[in-house]
Image (cartoon, helix red, strand yellow):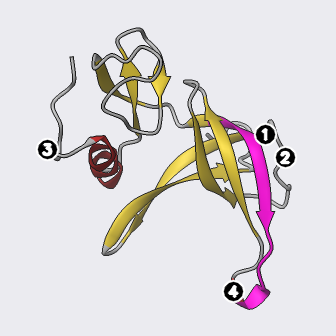
Amino acid sequence: MVEQSLSGHGPWAEYQARLNAGQLCIQQGGDGQFFFYPRVIAPGSGSNDWQWVAASGAASIYSLSRIPQRPERGGDYYVAIVELKEGPRMMTQLRLQSDELPKIGDAVEAFIEQQEGADALLLFKHGLQEGAR
């Protein structure tokens, strides 16, 4: 059974509305499998028996690219595909919390960046000190 929508629109609008409200939610099918990119039908099973659930925000780096950029434009940054603890993968920008350079397999944690006059963004922090999570 599909949980009541906050926004009354499609799955992506629902995901974004929850993110704007400060909640990281992903979909979980009736078979217990989590999935991300928001969809009307669960992948694999083709079922419309799914619900929105809060995600832990814990993830690890699955794939990583450094994007070179001039210092006056903010300097280099990292784009990654992260694998959530729940299983789905998502593309994101990493925010470095230390001088340690990110590498595949490193633990990262989600955070929501609220932007005035724009939709919230889901980003991930890298280089958190143990116990700071």
Against 13, residue 68 (above or below) is below
Which of labels 1 and 4 is toward the front?
4
Q: Nearer the viewer, residue 35 or 17?
A: 35
Q: Please give the label number shown on residue 73.
A: 4
Q: Sequence-wise, which precedes: disc 2 or disc 3? A: 3
Q: Please give the label number shown on residue 106.
A: 1
Against 85, residue 105 (above or below) is below
The Cα–Cα distance between marks 2 and 3, rounded to whole angstroms, is 40 Å
Residue located 17% across and 42% down the image: 6
The Cα–Cα distance between marks 3 and 4, rounded to whole angstroms, is 39 Å
Res 43 quadrant in image? top left
The Cα–Cα distance between marks 2 and 4, rounded to whole angstroms, is 24 Å
Residue 132 in view of the camera: no
Label 3, on which residue? 8
Helix, strand, or loop for circle 2? loop
Number of residues whose C-alpha sits closer than 10 Å to that of mark 1, classed few (under 14), some (14–19) or many (20 or more): some
In the rendered image, residue 13, in percent from the top left (x then y), is placed at 28, 50
The Cα–Cα distance between marks 1 and 4, rounded to whole angstroms, is 27 Å
Relative to 94, 18 lies left or right: left
Quarter of the image containing the N terminus? top left
